[in-house]
Amino acid sequence: MILGVSVALALAAVPSSGASREAFKAAMIYRLATFVAWPESALGDGSFVIGVLGASDVAGQLKELSGAQTIGGRPIEVRRIDGAAQLGGCVLVFVGQDRGGELEEVLSRASGRSLLTVSDVEGFASRGGMIELVRDGRKLKFEVHRGAATDAGLRVSSRLLELAAAVYPPVGDE
């Protein structure tokens, strides 16, 4: 059932209104996170903390999801962050297009940490970000940088990799 929902999210048409698009992105971020495994040491005993840099509408939509959903049995906590220096305590960070100029610093500070990096900035996955949300016409798809996730100690489900529009490095180039 979860896989079916993920396929629907990956292939469904993105709504045309701004608020609906942001709700769709938030739902996709949540669903994608359910297909990633973190080391127990990275999660601690508390909430599953999602940091959002920019993308205030996506942050608002994620906060609405947080009350009703969990990831890995942990309640979701959404934090608005003002910069890469505030990544501490987060297990997932979403960088909005409006803060794309800060990608290099975010990726640098995330390096060596079990922190899932997600963005809708064009070229994010090919530059070392872990999951990039990609618009393809009216569809929202995603690309995965499997190598970056593995280097961070994260395990991305093979089912998620099968659904990805692109995987870096390509399978077989390891």
Image (tube, helix red, strand yellow):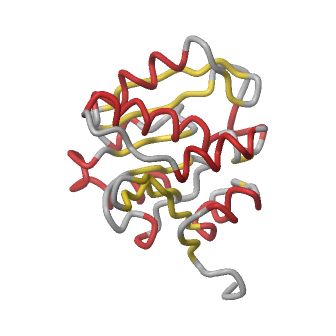
Quarter of the picture holding the C terminus: bottom right
User: Residue at left 69%, top 47%?
Assistant: 36
User: Residue at left 62%, top 41%?
Assistant: 33
Quick check: 166 left or right of 52?
right
> In the rendering, at what x and y percent does residue 58 appear?
36, 31
Instruction: Name the one closer to the observer, 167 or 135.
Output: 135
> In the rendering, at what x and y percent does residue 9 appear?
56, 44
81 over 162 or under it: above or below:
above
Report whether residue 112 is seen: yes
Instruction: Name the one closer to the observer, 25 or 100.
Output: 25
For residue 56, what is the image quadrant?
top left
Quick check: 162 left or right of 68?
right
Instruction: Name the one closer to the observer, 11 or 148.
Output: 11
User: Residue at left 28%, top 36%?
Assistant: 55
123 over 15 or under it: above or below:
below
> In the rendering, at what x and y percent does residue 108 appear?
41, 59
Quick check: 135 left or right of 73?
left
Quick check: 19 left or right of 34?
left
Instruction: Name the one closer to the observer, 60 or 83.
Output: 60
Q: Residue furthest bottom?
A: 173
Report whether residue 105 is seen: no
Q: How many marks?
A: 0
67 over 33 or under it: above or below:
above
User: Residue at left 63%, top 58%?
Assistant: 152
> In the rendering, at what x and y percent does residue 28 appear?
52, 40
Quarter of the picture holding the N terminus: top right
